[in-house]
């Protein structure tokens, strides 16, 4: 089955988890785009959404969904987002689309984080997908050296600037045996804004589109 159809299945299943009148968080990426498309047919389902990126904000507004400022809310009941990789422990690698910092903020503010994906994203161990790390521009080379000392080869996503005005390093070759410990360690490197590991705050539920239907973990 086409991966796009699997993503659509996961997105539609997640839409059924949204409580009418709720304010939700909405992430960034191809699977989330299916969720926004489905939500556009039911714009009255939610009272508004907090967005993880400028690209998602544009899509939500075009769908007739009010985009809200997280600072004006006490929190969120539900956050819907995708992942580049996920394990059955619900640890994730995110940030392929460059929105990892805002995604991590919205995930932290939400009572429940539902990750929607197709089954090709489910892995035994994280790390096949390069780990994105958002860095302050002046620290890019320093952080890359620190990562090399830890066994990672950091490639600058040249020409790309995040919504926060920062750079992205995509790190290849890291051994991610303990995602929680590695996230804590990399967060302490001076100049790192956010690490694309979502292990300290993992997803609460994985909704996985497959050829047979939808699996939840």
Image (spheres, grey):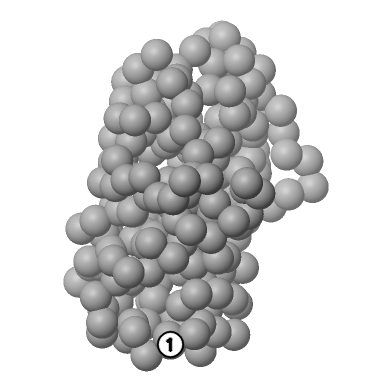
Position of residue 168 measured from the top left corner of the image (x, y, whole percent): 63, 40
Q: Is residue 158 above or below residue 125?
A: below
Q: Residue at x 35, y 17 (%)?
A: 178
Taking depth in this image into account, of 36 and 207 the one nearest to the observer is: 207
Q: Is residue 106 visible?
A: yes
Position of residue 62 measured from the top left corner of the image (x, y, whole percent): 59, 85
Q: Residue furthest front?
A: 212
Q: Residue 30 lies in what quarter of the image?
A: bottom right
Q: Residue 90 lies in what quarter of the image?
A: top left
Q: Is residue 34 above or below residue 118?
A: below
Residue position for label 1: 43
Taking depth in this image into account, of 66 and 204 the one nearest to the observer is: 204
Q: Is residue 207 above or below residue 185?
A: below
Position of residue 197 measured from the top left corner of the image (x, y, whole percent): 43, 34
Position of residue 45 measured from the top left corner of the image (x, y, whole percent): 34, 84
Instruction: Specify whether 30 is left or right of 110.
Output: right
Q: Residue furthest right?
A: 159
* Number of marks in the rendered image: 1
Q: Secondary structure at mark 1?
A: helix
Q: Residue at x 32, y 20 (%)?
A: 181
Q: Alpha-carbon neighbours of circle 1 within 10 Å: few (<14), some, or many (≥20)?
A: some
Instruction: Specify whether 15 is left or right of 140.
Output: left
Taking depth in this image into account, of 182 and 142 the one nearest to the observer is: 182
Q: Residue at x 36, y 45 (%)?
A: 215
Q: Is residue 146 visible?
A: no
């Amino acid at each position: 089955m086409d991966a796009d159809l699997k993503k659509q299945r996961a997105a539609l299943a997640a839409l059924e988890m949204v409580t009418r009148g709720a304010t939700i968080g909405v992430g960034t990426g191809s699977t989330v785009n299916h969720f926004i498309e489905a939500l556009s047919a039911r714009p009255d389902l939610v009272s508004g959404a907090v967005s993880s990126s400028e690209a998602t904000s544009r899509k939500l507004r075009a769908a007739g969904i009010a985009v809200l400022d997280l600072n004006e809310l006490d929190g969120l009941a539900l956050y819907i987002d995708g992942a580049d990789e996920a394990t059955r422990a619900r640890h994730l690698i995110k940030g392929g689309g460059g929105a990892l910092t805002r995604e991590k903020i919205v995930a932290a503010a939400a009572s429940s984080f539902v990750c929607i994906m197709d089954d090709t994203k489910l892995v035994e161990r994280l790390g096949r997908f390069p780990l994105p790390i958002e860095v302050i521009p002046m620290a890019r080379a320093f952080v890359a050296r620190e990562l090399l000392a830890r066994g990672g080869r950091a490639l600058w996503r040249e020409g790309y600037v995040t919504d926060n005005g920062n750079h992205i390093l995509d790190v290849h070759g890291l051994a991610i045996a303990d995602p929680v410990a590695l996230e804590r360690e990399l967060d302490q490197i001076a100049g790192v804004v956010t690490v694309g590991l979502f292990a300290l705050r993992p997803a609460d539920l994985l909704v996985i589109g497959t050829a047979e239907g939808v699996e939840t973990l």
